[in-house]
Each structure stands twice: as structure tokens, then as C-alpha cells.
Amino acid sequence: MTPLLDLQRRMASAVMQPLAQSDQMRRRNPQRRSNAKEAAEFIKPNSRLTSFERLEIYNRQYWFRILDSFAEDFPGLRAVVGRKRFDRIARAYLTECPSQSFTLRNLGQFLPQWLADHNDLAGDRYSLAADMLKLEWAHIEAFDAADLPRLTPEALMTLGEDPQLLLQPHISLHELHYAVDDLLLAVRKHDEEQEETGAARAFPIRRWLKNSPEPIYLAVHRADYSVCYRRLERESYLLLTTLRERKPLSEALETAFAQSPLSEEDQAMHIQEWFAAWMALGWFAVPFRSHGENE
């Protein structure tokens, strides 16, 4: 290891270590070594600050930045559990799952599973919090996921009688128990109004705590450079999830309507309407083999 690389790694390790409860730099690092002694080995003091104080500035600014980014990514979770619980969740999660990426976009990639393993931190609102996390992480992924060449009606006709259709990578499908799509939109609107007025009133979450009597089926997708939410009927959700598994269209249709009360006539009408809407939205991509990627 070169001296420069060693210095860079020591600096990164020091800057990224969690803050103390007081939001100050800890006196000892995770290896129980004095941070003051560590800082003195690679940071010079100046006329106003010690080596430790200079290092502490970077440590605090790093953590304040990732905590702010985390809060920006998950305003819905913050509204569900409240600010105090959210702060505890953020600090505990980022301590156990520190950033491993060059981009802050990936900060929350392990959060849904992590919160499932630490559901006590969400209290009696964990079920709502879990649904909200599904939506918020899907939103993040849809924002910059790939958009493959769209399947045109003409190209669809060339795929045979029982094609395997490819959904766009930015589409995700979710079965939810709470109306978190409407809730997240309300939270974002509330936060925008609070920012404009300079107020600091907590989001009124109480009316959203009751779960839906029936499952809510939701597609999260991107359209015209914006992330959108689209509710689905149960049958269309099953159809799309089966197509997502790259099953033939005939198998997807059989799965979708296996327990459906719809008549054959109504089924045909719904299929026509769904596919017309999905094709217009560009939800299907040209299969890889059709544009040479698997050749």
C-alpha cells in the first residue's frame, strides 16, 4: 500500500465514523484508539484549531450531509414514525450500513430489510412504515433506472402467438396494505407548503394509520422524466408480475384470471384496455434477442 493510499483510507475511516449522541466527534474510534492521537498523525493544527478539532469539522459535516440526504429520500417514513423515531432509525441504520457507493442515491438500498430486522424502532406503525419504504425505495429506483427501446405494436406482432414480453426496468409492482401512494403525495405537498411558509408543523398522520380493507396493487414507473404511481386491478397486477418473470403470455393470462369472477367477455375487454394503456405508456421493451443483445 502506498503512503498516499494509506493516508486516504485513514482519513476516510476517521471522517465516516459515527458521531456521538451530542453530535460531536467521538473521543475514540471503533478500534478504541484515541481520535485525538489519530488526527495528530496526519493533520496539522493551526493557530485556532487542534488537529482533532480540524478532523471533527469534516466528521460532523460528513454525517450532517448523509443524514440530510437520508431525510430527503424518505420523507414518507419520517411522517409515519415521527421525527424522533426517524432520527434514531437513520443513525442506527447508517451506523450499521454505512455508505458503500460513490453516490448518495444508494444510501437506503438496505433499509427495507434492515427495518424488518429492527421493526421495534418503528413501534406499532411498522406495517405502515414497511409499505411506505417499499414505495419510497421503488421511487428512487424508478427515477434513474434504464429505459430500453419501446416495443411498438408492429414489433409486437412479430413476436409470435405466445410471446415472452419484457417489462421496462423502471417498472416495479407492489401489493400494499395501506394507501401509501396517496399518503406520500400528501406528505410531499405538506413539506413543500411548510418550506414555503417557514413553518415546522408535523404531518397529521393519524387519519392514514388505518389499513385498506382490500390489498392495493400498485405500479411505480417513469413517464416523461417523472416517477408516477398507477393503481392496478388484481388481475392486471398478476398478469404483469407473471410477465415480469418472463413467462409466456398464455401462462400469464391463465395466472391472472385463475380465480377471477370476471366473465370471459369482460376478461377480453379488460385485456384490450390494459394492453392499450401499457403500450401507450411504453411499459414493454423490445426483447433483448430482437435488438441483438443476446446474439
Image (tube, rainbow, N blue to C red):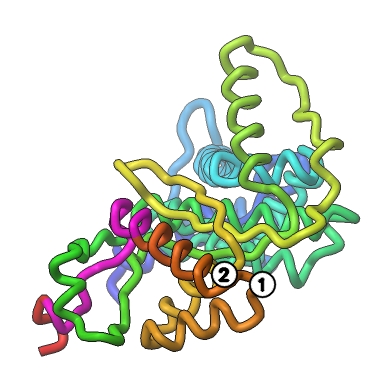
The kind of secondary structure element at disc 1 is: loop
Q: Using a 10 Å C-alpha cutoff, classify the residue at mark 1 as few (fewer than 14 neighbours), some (14 to 19) or many (20 or more).
A: few
Look at discs 2 and 1 and give the one toward the viewer.
Answer: 1
Mark 1 is on which residue type?
Answer: Pro
**In the image, what residue occupies the spot 54% across and 83% down?**
255
Q: Which residue is mark 2?
A: 235
Give the camera-side residue of 104 and 49: 104
Tell me the quarter of the image containing the C terminus: bottom left
Give the camera-side residue of 232 and 130: 232
Q: Using a 10 Å C-alpha cutoff, classify the residue at mark 2 as few (fewer than 14 neighbours), some (14 to 19) or many (20 or more).
A: many
Mark 2 is on which residue type?
Answer: Glu
**In the image, what residue occupies the spot 81% across and 64% down?**
119
Tell me the quarter of the image containing the N terminus: bottom left
What separation in Å lies between label 2 and label 1 (alpha carbons)? 10 Å
> Which residue reaches farthest right?
124
* Residue stretch rendered in magenta on the structure: 276-290
**In the image, what residue occupies the spot 40% across and 86% down?**
250
Q: Check if residue 66 falls in the magenta segment.
A: no
Q: Position of residue 10 (x, y in %)?
A: 46, 62
The kind of secondary structure element at disc 2 is: helix
Q: Which residue is mark 1?
A: 261
Prevailing secondary structure class for the magenta stretch in the rendered image: helix
> Who comes first in sequence, dot 2 or dot 1?
2
Specify whether 126 is left or right of 231.
right
